[in-house]
Image: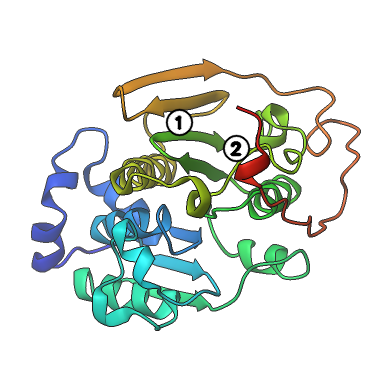
Amino acid sequence: MNFSEEQLERYSRHIILRQVGVEGQEKIMRGKVLIIGAGGLGAPAALYLAAAGVGTIGFADGDKVELSNLQRQIIHFTPDVGKPKVLSAKEKIGAINPAIKTILYEKRLAADSIADIIKDYDFVIDGTDNFPGKFLINDACVLARKPFSHGGILRFDGQALTYVPGEACYRCVFPKMPPKGAVPSCSQAGILGAVAGMLGTIQAAEALKFLIGTGELLINRLLIFDALKMDFRTVSVKRNPECPVCSEHPAITKLVDEEEQACDLKNRPR
């Protein structure tokens, strides 16, 4: 790849890094990353991936921008309220870096569509805000042997885990969806906006490190942070030999859409 003068200047801070250099920047520019969910996590992840020069960024989200989104979903602006999130995201990406190719999927990915979409990407970022989506992404990526970054946020807390084939997956840590009433959603319990930015940026860094092939990913490690105390820790996890999806004899061999389990905060045990 022959870099133009504009590209050399734009990516100069990457190129001077010993762990990146020209070869690493070439890998980034050839990379293809799919972001599922153009919200609190997907927004900061997309902005940093576009700024870094990731060649192709896919967005999958069926929602429209709402006023309550703007507290944390920084890729959307006030005039975007009512606009499809994927279109709003595409416009901001184009403003940051016109060279980026964006592919839009204006829908909520389901069991009958996700496998065909993820196959064209090098890395997937889970920016969803619901458990059915997270388990579907995990299962689809494991079955397709596709690396992905899991991210979850609530109140002041965040967690992240990176999966690559042959290592621990999301179901190795959380084998099945939590029971009804166990975990509230962000719309029910709240979320500090900056926490979404913190975790989405971590997911972007994981994607970039994977594309470049440098550093240590959050493989077999669950990163947990409490922004209220500003405390970060990692918990070692192992591949579960009885994991329902990534074990040698999996119980899950095809994708299904699981039902969302809503949480009733009034009846939730304290």
Q: Which residue is mark 1?
A: 217
Total numbered labels placed on residues in the image: 2
Horizontal side of 232 relative to 99 (left or right) equals right
Q: Name the one closer to the observer, 244 or 62.
A: 62
Identity of the amino acid at label 2? Val
Mark 2 neighbour density, 10 Å: few (under 14) some (14–19) many (20 or more): many
Q: Secondary structure at mark 1?
A: loop
Instruction: Name the residue: 77% across, 37% down.
Output: 176
As drawn, 147 above or below 110: above
Identity of the amino acid at label 1? Leu
Q: Which residue is the extreme one toward the front?
A: 266
Q: Position of residue 27 (x, y in %)?
A: 36, 52
Q: Quadrant of the N terminus?
A: bottom left
Q: Which residue is mark 2?
A: 164
Instruction: Report the disc number at residue 157.
Output: none
| Quadrant hosting residue 100 | bottom left
Identify the mark nearer the N-term, 1 or 2. Answer: 2
As drawn, 235 above or below 4: above
Horizontal side of 66 relative to 96 (left or right) equals right
Q: CA distance from mark 1 to mark 2?
A: 9 Å
